[in-house]
Structure formats: C-alpha cells, structure tokens
Amino acid sequence: VRDAAAFDHAVAEAEHARPPRSTGRLRRSERRAGMLFVVPAVVLYATLLALPILQTFYYSLTRWNGIDATFIGLGNYERLFTDPTFWRVVANNVVLLAAIPLAILIPLAVAFLLNEHVYGWRFFRSSYFLPTAISWVVIGIVAVRFFAQRGILNSLLSTLGIPLQTDMLASEWTAMLAVAITFIWSVFGTNTIIFITGMATLDRDVYEAARVDGAGGFATFRYITIPLLMRFIQFAFILTLITGFTALFSLIFVMTRGGPGFGTTTLEFYVYQTAFAQGQFGYAAAVGVVLFVIVFGISIIQLRLFRDRSD
Amino acid sequence: MALAGRRLKRLAIFAVLCVVVVVMLFPFAYMILTSFRSYDQFLAGSGFSLDSWQGLSDTLPVVQQLINSAIVTISAVALILFTSTTAGFAFAKLRFPVAPLLFVGILAGMMIPVQSIIIPEFVNIANVGLINQYPGPILVYAALGIPFGTYLMTTYFRGVPTELMEASLMDGASYRQIFTGVMLPLAIPAIVTVAVLQFIQIWGDLLIGLLFLNQPDVRTITVGLATLQSSRIVPVPMIMAGSILSALPAVIVYLFFQRQLIAGLTMGMGK
C-alpha cells in the first residue's frame, strides 16, 4: 500500500529542488513549460475546490438564503451547538463509528481464510470485490427491499421458522442500525482486498516457524498476522472512517431520506437537508465546516501515523 | 491423520467462503430474478415475464438517461485525465516556481469532503447559468477528481527515468513533444487506473447529479433511479430492472479492469 504516507513522501521530495542541469535558455523554457502544464489543473482546482471551501467558511458566518448574505459572526455556530437536532445527528455518526470495528474485523477474518488459497479462491476474491463496482444508490435500493416489512429479511426469518418479524426502517434506532449494517456490507469488499494485499506481503517463513513452534490457527492470526498487518489495518480503518463520514449520502437518501424523524440523518446528510430542503444556506455551511474540520483532522492524524512509521 | 485434519480444515474454510459469497452476491441474484417478474408474479413469488423491462422505458427515459450518464462521466474522466497527466508530468519532471506549494495545495484537496463545498459550488454554478447543462456537473466532477489523479500521475511519472526526457531534449524535442511522445505512452497503466476508478465513482454518484441536473431529461441514470425509488409508487420489479441497467456499465468496466481497480485502491484512495 502506497497510501497517504506517499503524500508525505511526495511532499518531501517536491521540496528538494533538483540540482541545476542546463543552461539559462533551457532553464527558462523548462520553467515556462512547467507553469503551462499545471495551468489546467490549477484553474479547475482553484475555482471549483479552493474557492468554495473558503466560501463555505465565510458563509458559515452569515445568514444566507443563497442570494443575500448578512454577516452574523459566530451566530450559526452558537445555534448549532445548542441545537438538539445537531446532537441527534452527531449521535447517528457515532453509531456508524461503532460499526467500524465490525467493518474491519469481518474482512480481516475472511482475508485470513482467503489467504489459505483453498479451491476457487480467485473466484471468491472477485465476488467479494464486485459490489465495489455498483453505486450506493443500487445498494440502497436492494437494502430497502431487504429490511422492508414485507421484505427479504422477514421472509428469511419465517422460512427458517423464527417467530420474529421486523420493520427496521420504521423506527429511528433500528433504521440507523439497518443503515450501519448496509454500510458494513458495502465496505467489506474494499477492506478484504486491502488485507489480502497486505497478507501477500508477509513472509511465509514466519508462518512456518509459528507452526513448528506449535501455534494454532487463532494464535497465528492474533500474534503474527494482526501485528504484521498493522499498517494495512490502520489504512482500512481511516478509509472506512472517512467513507462513513462522507460517502453515505446516496445510501441514506435512497434508504430512509434521513428519517424517520432525524433517525438516520448524519452530518453530511444534514448539510443537504438544511441547505436544499430548508434553504438555510448559512447554517448548513456551518455544518459543512464542522464536517470539514472532522475529516481534515482525521486525515492529519493519518499522516502523522504514517510518518511515525516510515521514519 | 494429520493430512485428514488438514483436508477437513480446508473444507471448512471453503464452506465459510461459500457462505460469504452468497451474502455478497445475493443482491445481484435478487435484482436479476425480481426484474424478470411482473408485479403480480413478484407478489406471488414465482413466474417469468418481461413486463417490468418493458414498463421501465415508459416510466423512465432510460435510454436518454443512460446517454446523459455516458456524456457526463466520459467527459469528466477525460478532463481529469488531461489535467492530471499534464500536472503530474510537470510536478514530477519539471522545475518551476511555486511547484511544491501548488503540489501540496492540490493534494490537500483530497481531504475536502464534497458536502463541505457543495453549497457555494451550487450557488456559483447557478450564477454562471450551468444548472441543467452538462458542463456544470462535468466541471465539478473533474475538479473533485483532480487531487487524486494528480497525486497518482505524479507518483507514476517520478518512476520514469529522467534520462529519457533529457535524451529527447538533446535531440531538440519540445516539452510538449516529450509529453505526448515519450511520457504518455509510458504512463498508460496509471492512466487506466485513474480512468477506471473515476468512471465507477462518477457513474454511481448521486449528490452532484441530483443538484446540478434536476430536470428528468438531463438527469443521469443514477439520479433517475434514486428519484424513482423515493417516489415509492413504482413497482419493485421495475426498480430492479432500472437498478440492473444503471449498474451494468460500471460492472462491465469492473470485470475488464479488476486488476487496475485493485491497484488504484491499494495506492491509497478509491471508493
């Protein structure tokens, strides 16, 4: 995995100017070429990413309906942090956070089994990864059919003779649980692939030695595989975390529209709701800033982690 | 005895992996089976019919929306490839003022969640009159793809020996000629990786399409499908037919380029 550690590395390299190698005329033409070649990327980046993030910060300090903005200082933030709905939304993000250990451990265990290379393992690997190619919208559509009152889960339960009928999407916490389960299912393939890639880098001899020493399957997994895979586990953890905070809009839109009530509204969905359903653009911008700070913070921690390891 | 135990263990592993396959592939089987039933057959739980597929084209302008998706996705991917290969080449091989600063700035863009910029983005795009016009979402998707694309291309070009470029310079080639004649052909594996990752991501995106293309005839298939679903009056089998149709292009891309997709993922980002 070349991961975000590479970011660090790349930055370090970019800072070391290479020694001069050519005459003034060539040097000038190199400089001009360099600047010309980055113009398209820089123009798009500046107008469509850098500018809007700055605008989000500015507008979060205003009352704004999309046309006229009135500066109100930290008013939106004061309102936000005393708003019970905001804290309800944060609690939903915490539920997703709580799902992450499962979203890591299940793929880790399956990758460990897959690494035994039993008959058909290539087919298994491809099948596990296939859902990565389909959109959250399609995943959400099937998930609704799965959890619905007259859906797959209930018919499965009655087929198995279990006297229990569910209607998970109908009440707040069970709906959030349904979203979290779908989330775990969706990131399974990606995380499994990350761990398989990691395991492929491990030295076979270590396992041989462990076997000779009489270590069983679980001991090997716990004391050898996991510690050696720590980099990959961290990477999968961060990726899953960021996915949970920023990539579930479509899933929630299709499955529950954030409801019932605010039962499945996460921060990213709350931005959409307050801005485009309620027209409170300034307030929504403040939520956007909170989300940005969280994601940026996670990314910085990630860079730190990888820097510590690469030194 | 030890051999028998080993066999048993491998059989058990095989069985567990089979169960996981069922869990992962079940939605695909469900979509396909359900789509080939009429609504009555769906309720009854058996039968075969093409009703839902026929009904789909009457309910949703599927062909038009597939074309919309193709236009938006392919244009955005092309724009990402153009900007990230040129910028990647410059950052990796050319010395020019403020390059390190620009590079770090662009890479930091990977840490910006789309929801944090979506409000001003929407207002800006509306102000220049690009709502419900293809260039609106195309430009936004392209900008969102630039940080990762540029990062990946820069890393790749750093691995290309600088001697190759210097030799061409000696022969009097311009930087543009070196870029198109020497560098691009060498970078094809990285280009394919960026293209595949971005294609799948943009094809399946909802938020940008939902906001920037809000008329049914310009919508992408993913957005059309999501609005169809949330209307809650469309029969389930028809929605499944729509789901298959919308998923198919990305699944085909996946089947052809699985290796590049995995390579891109393990290079740091992805879905």
Image (tube, grey):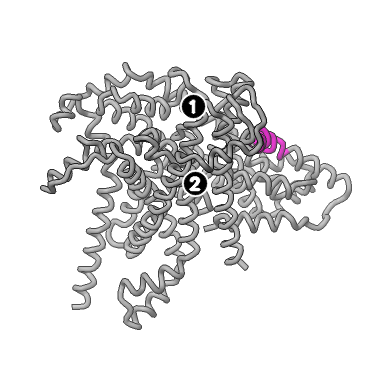
Residue pictured at 35% horizontal, 27% vertical: B230
Res B145 visible:
no
Q: Residues within 10 Å of mark 2 (few under 14, many from 20)?
A: some
Reading the image, the residue beneath label 1 is A278
Asked whether A47 falls inside the magenta stretch, the response is: yes
Asked whether B204 falls inside the magenta stretch, the response is: no
Quadrant where the image shows the C terminus of chain A: bottom right
Q: Mark 2 lies on which chain?
A: B
Query: Which element is circle 2 on?
Result: loop
Is the residue A266 above or below the residue A4 in the image?
Answer: above
Looking at the rendering, the stretch of residues picked out in magenta corresponds to A37-54
Picture coordinates of residue B127, whole percent (x, y): 63, 21
Res B242 visible:
yes
Picture coordinates of residue B34, whole percent (x, y): 23, 32
Residue pictured at 40% horizontal, 74% vertical: A223
B102 left or right of A257 in image:
right
B94 left or right of A115 in image:
right
Q: Which chain carries label 1?
A: A
Is the residue B53 above or below the residue A124 in the image?
Answer: above
Query: Which element is circle 1 on?
Result: loop
**Discs 2 and 1 lie in a common subunit:** no
Give the alpha-carbon distance from disc 2 to disc 1, as whole Å: 32 Å
Reading the image, the residue beneath label 2 is B270
- The amino acid pointed to by label 1 is Gln
In terms of depth relative to the viewer, which is nearer, B264 or A88? A88
